[in-house]
Image (tube, rainbow, N blue to C red):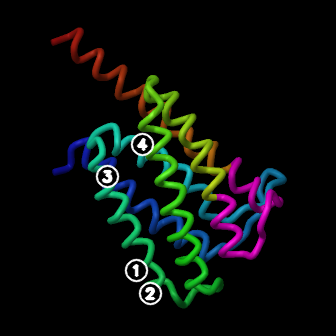
Amino acid sequence: MFTKKWLFGYAYVLSIFAANLTVSYFGLIKLFGLTFPAGALLIGLCFSLRDLVQNEFGHKVWWFMLAAMIVSVFSGVILSHLPIPMWKVVLASAVAFIVSEAIDWFVYTITKMDIVWRVAISNIFSGIADSILFVGIAFGAWGWLPPVYGQFYIKYISGLLVIPLILYFRRKRKQQILYS
């Protein structure tokens, strides 16, 4: 049960917990002149992993999204001793998760292009929604403020890091076909 398909699914669900842990422990950070919640580095990856799971499982991705949501909520119980009130992180994560993942699913579904473009396009829309909602709820910073646009930029760039993985597996599959 550790095929590429399932590996994407497990990584997607675990990325939510890792992002919550990171933002709870480090809060807002400054890097490259941008201010953003530390978890943004992992949430961008989460969006792209969700796209890969949808590519492998189709609309059954909703089961993985439900599992990731449960992990997000339960991480609040586990991580409640950290500096930022975890209930804010869990609430922010839950609301931002539901909205942004649904947007990501929708945009990915209606975009009929190569997976690389689908990932890049869907991450724009889901990243903006997630950034505004998460930062607003968790930190009280509503609008297009430095923590919001900082989170979006970092999240979007980290989400694009799966594209080399997609291209690697595509090239590997083509090589297997050629040499079979």
84 or 57: nearer the eye? 57
Assess whether mark 1 and mark 2 are in contact (beta carbons under 8 angstroms).
Answer: yes
Assess whether mark 2 and mark 4 are in contact (beta carbons under 8 angstroms).
Answer: no
Q: Secondary structure at mark 1?
A: helix
- Disc 3 versus disc 4: nearer the observer: 4
Assess whether mark 3 and mark 1 are in contact (beta carbons under 8 angstroms).
Answer: no
At label 1, which amino acid type do we have? Phe
- Distance from the alpha carbon under mark 3 to that under mark 4: 10 Å
Few, some or many C-alpha atoms within 10 Å of disc 4 (few <14, some 14-19, many ≥20)?
many
Query: Which residue lies at the image location 33% right of the left edge and 47% below the top edge?
Result: 8
Q: Which residues are magenta?
A: 131-153
Q: Secondary structure at mark 2?
A: helix
Query: Which residue lies at the image location 49% right of the left edge and 49% below the top edge?
Result: 47
Residue ranking furthest to the top: 178
Classify residue 175 as left or right of residue 89: left
- Distance from the alpha carbon under mark 2 to that under mark 3: 23 Å
Q: Quadrant of residue 114?
A: top left
Relative height, residue 86 to residue 102 (above, below): below
Relative height, residue 174 to residue 7 (above, below): above
Q: Secondary structure at mark 4?
A: helix
Image disc number at residue 74 = 1
Query: Which residue lies at the image location 21% right of the left edge and 43% below the top edge?
Result: 3
At label 2, which amino acid type do we have? Val
Majority secondary structure in the magenta region:
helix
Picture coordinates of residue 66, whole percent (x, y) = 34, 64
Q: Which residue is mark 2?
A: 77
Image disc number at residue 9 = 3
Assess whether mark 3 and mark 2 are in contact (beta carbons under 8 angstroms).
Answer: no
At label 4, which amino acid type do we have? Asp
